[in-house]
């Protein structure tokens, strides 16, 4: 299964690398930004599942970055700050932060907060094997097992199914799926999303009903 993507926007190089190291250890796919402008570029390109966002960064501060993100994206965000003033936290929550961590902090505590926030937001944790909707998924072999029968999936089919499971109960648009699975620079027909999901549902048999069509919006996964 593709790891859950987490953007770490932090201008302190050492702290950013420590956080990324802990994210990798937990099985997440982390990538870092040293200033606000790079953070916005990576957010647009990578479509992260969670953002760790420092308040004080060069070029654009965390509040400015989050305001722009919140215009189109409800991605879970944890803000980092060395400040203890109540007004800073209030401002962060007003522009759309989901949680706040004050420096200095324990990286282990941050990992716990990330897991809790992902769970509240409907994003699953990353595991090599996952039992969901009566299916066993094996990321190492890119297979699903239904009623003791192994079913092989193509790379795109497996990535789409993993994406759905990692975002249970959230509605995913065709554009989001296309950008995440085929890449930001893909220029083909968006109908490839529907075609691949149709093929995936057929392979899943009765379990294909777990992937629900949301009319006029996209798809969502529901057990």
Image (spheres, grey):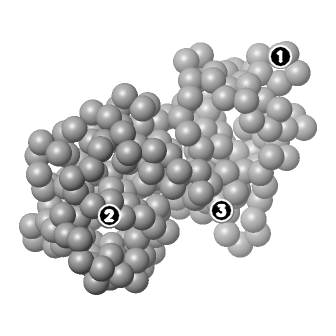
**What label does residue 171 carry, if any?**
3
Gap in angstroms between the C-alphas marked 2 and 1: 44 Å
Residue 8 point in image, percent of width and height: 28, 51
Disc 2 marks which residue? 79
Residue drawn at point x = 10 percent, y = 71 percent = 59
Q: Residues within 10 Å of mark 2 (few under 14, many from 20)?
A: many
Left or right side of 112 for 105: left
Left or right side of 165 for 205: right
Relative to the observer, which residue lies in front, 196 or 160?
A: 160
Camera sees residue 203:
no
Judging from the image, what secondary structure is the residue with disc 2 in?
strand
Relative to the observer, which residue lies in front, 142 or 39?
A: 39
Disc 1 marks which residue? 149
**What label does residue 210 carry, if any?**
none
Q: How crowded is mark 3: few (under 14 residues within 10 Å), some or many (20 or more)?
A: some
Relative to the observer, which residue lies in front, 92 or 169?
A: 92
Name above or below for residue 137 compared with residue 35.
above
Residue drawn at point x = 32 percent, y = 60 percent = 101
The mark lying in front, picked from 2 and 1, is 2
- CB under 8 Å between discs 1 and 3: no
Residue 44 point in image, percent of width and height: 34, 61
Judging from the image, what secondary structure is the residue with disc 3 in?
loop
Camera sees residue 164:
yes
Residue 9 point in image, percent of width and height: 24, 56
Name above or below for residue 107 compared with residue 62.
above
Residue drawn at point x = 87 percent, y = 34 percent = 205
Left or right side of 175 for 46: left
Residue 208 point in image, percent of width and height: 82, 41
Q: In which quarter of the image is residue 106?
A: top left
Total of numbered circles in the picture?
3
């Amino acid at each position: 299964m593709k790891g859950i993507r987490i953007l770490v926007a932090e201008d302190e190089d050492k702290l950013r690398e420590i956080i990324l190291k802990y994210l990798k250890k937990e099985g997440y796919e982390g990538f870092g930004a040293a200033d606000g402008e790079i953070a916005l570029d990576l957010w647009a390109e990578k479509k992260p599942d969670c953002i760790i966002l420092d308040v004080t960064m060069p070029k654009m501060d965390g509040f400015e970055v989050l305001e722009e993100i919140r215009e189109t994206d409800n991605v879970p965000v944890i803000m980092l700050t060395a400040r203890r003033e109540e007004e800073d936290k209030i401002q962060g929550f007003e522009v759309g932060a989901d949680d706040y961590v004050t420096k200095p902090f324990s990286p282990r505590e941050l990992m716990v907060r990330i897991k809790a926030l992902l769970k509240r937001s409907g994003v699953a944790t990353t595991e090599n094997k996952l039992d969901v909707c009566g299916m066993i998924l094996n990321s190492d072999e890119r297979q699903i097992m239904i009623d003791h029968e192994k079913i092989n999936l193509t790379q795109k089919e497996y990535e789409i199914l993993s994406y759905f499971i990692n975002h249970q109960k959230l509605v995913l648009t065709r554009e989001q799926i296309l950008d995440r699975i085929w890449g930001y620079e893909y220029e083909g027909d968006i109908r490839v999303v529907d075609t691949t999901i149709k093929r995936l549902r057929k392979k899943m048999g009765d379990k294909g009903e777990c992937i629900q069509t949301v009319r006029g919006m996209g798809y969502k996964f529901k057990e």
